[in-house]
Image (tube, rainbow, N blue to C red):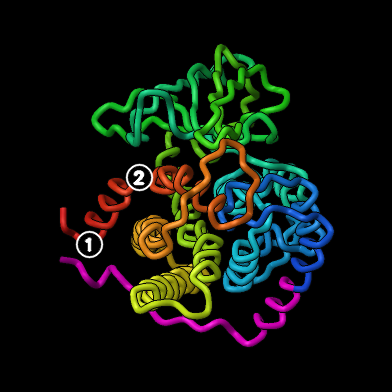
Amino acid sequence: MNTNSLRFPPSVLPPETENLRADVRSFLSDAATADAWKSNSDFGTGFSPEFSRKLAERGWIGMTWPRDYGGSERSNLERYVVTEELLAAGAPVFAHWIADRQSGPLLLRYGSEAQRREILPRITAGECFFSIGMSEPDSGSDLASVRTKAERVTAGWLLNGAKVWTSNAHVNHCMITLARTSEAGGDRHGGLSQFLIDLVHDDIEINPIVNMLGAHEFNEVVLDEVTIPADRLIGKEGEGWQQVTSELAYERSGPERFLSNFHVFRALIDAVGSEPNVQQEEALGRLAGRAWTLRCMSLSVAAMLEAGESPDIEAAIVKELGNRFEREIVETARQICPIEPVFEIGNNQADFAGLMGEAILRQPSFTLRGGTTEIMRSIISRGLGLR
């Protein structure tokens, strides 16, 4: 086993981040009073362009990016603090989340100068939101089985295919989509490229997919004889697999992978009260210990990113363990505080029964987005030389 490839060096936030944390908490306190959002620590629940623009005004979108593109040139650890506080407060961050977390960094790394100049400042201003165009109908988790095709034509590129689970494609501005530009040959990961789709102006079809909570978040995006300009190719033709795996690493490395049910954990502590029995004490202690351990591991990943490293295996481990922890919160709550959950579709209850009902219905999605549990374990086992 190649254990030398697995590292979680202890990391400590520098003292100056405490002032930033205080600023973020003060901002969130004022914003929560003004906007009165329903607190939910899952980044994918609250879509508020207005809130995203308020964050942008503070320089908290694209924090680590160069100032030439609208960024603040702050550290990954400072960005970590802001991310952690936003999720803990249950702020409505979904509008800008994908653009800030992965689409912008992908363009910063692989995009043309024209693409960076055009799009990145709009992201940092809270005016450009992104969807992910990876998964396809009937493909499951096999991303390499992409059937969407892009072929060169006189006007640029002609795309045909479909993408599913494209969160907020009906309200976002852009989507980075993975398409096949040549036959794979002996390498099924070969012949793939990434393209920039204009969700507002391109001639595409967006079909809603309503989830079990009665919410319209997911969509199917159909590309039927869609022509886009040649300069919408991202990076180099045929290198899409390398680029998309880099994008997925951004998606898996943050604290959102174990904080999605933090609001349920907090509500569980309140529901148990100040005089828990022995079983409740032990269960809450286990959850608190695992939450802190995951936080230390996630912070270590952020520190490695700040050092210019590529902790792909470590990020996959945090995501896989984080998904387990998210389920464990719900399962533990049902055991030690047996309140009947409220499963009313579209309920807006902030009490424990309402939060539990929503968490139970949302729980299956946690092990799918960003890569299934099986995919994560495959990445980890390959990285450790186990297969």
Quarter of the image for residue 40 reads bottom right
Quadrant assignment, res 332: bottom left
Residue 251 highlighted magenta (yes or no): no
The one of 287 and 19 positioned closer to us in this rendering: 287
Q: Looking at the image, which residue sits at the far top?
A: 225
Tell me which residue sits at (39%, 73%) in the image: 280
Query: Residue 363: horizontal and vertical position, in percent?
Result: 44, 47
Badge 2 or badge 1: first in the primary sequence? 2
- Give the camera-side residue of 69 and 295: 295
Q: Secondary structure at mark 2?
A: loop
Contact, mark 2 vs mark 1 (Cβ under 8 Å): no
Residue occupying the point 55% across, 18% down? 223
In the displayed structure, does residue 11 sit left or right of residue 23? left
Q: Position of residue 97 (x, y in %)?
A: 62, 50
- Residue 244 higher or lower than 149, as above or below: below
What's the residue type where badge 1 is placed? Answer: Leu
Q: Residues within 10 Å of mark 2 (few under 14, many from 20)?
A: some
Assess whether residue 8 is covered by the magenta stretch.
yes
Residue drawn at x 58%, y 68% as measured from the top left: 80
**Which residue carries the number 1 mark?**
384
Residue 153 location in percent, x, y?
56, 15
Q: CA distance from mark 2 to mark 1?
A: 19 Å
Q: Residue at x 63, y 54 (%)?
A: 350
Which image quarter holds the N terminus? bottom left
Q: Amino acid at mark 2?
A: Thr
Q: Which residue is mark 2?
A: 372
Residue range in magenta is 1-25
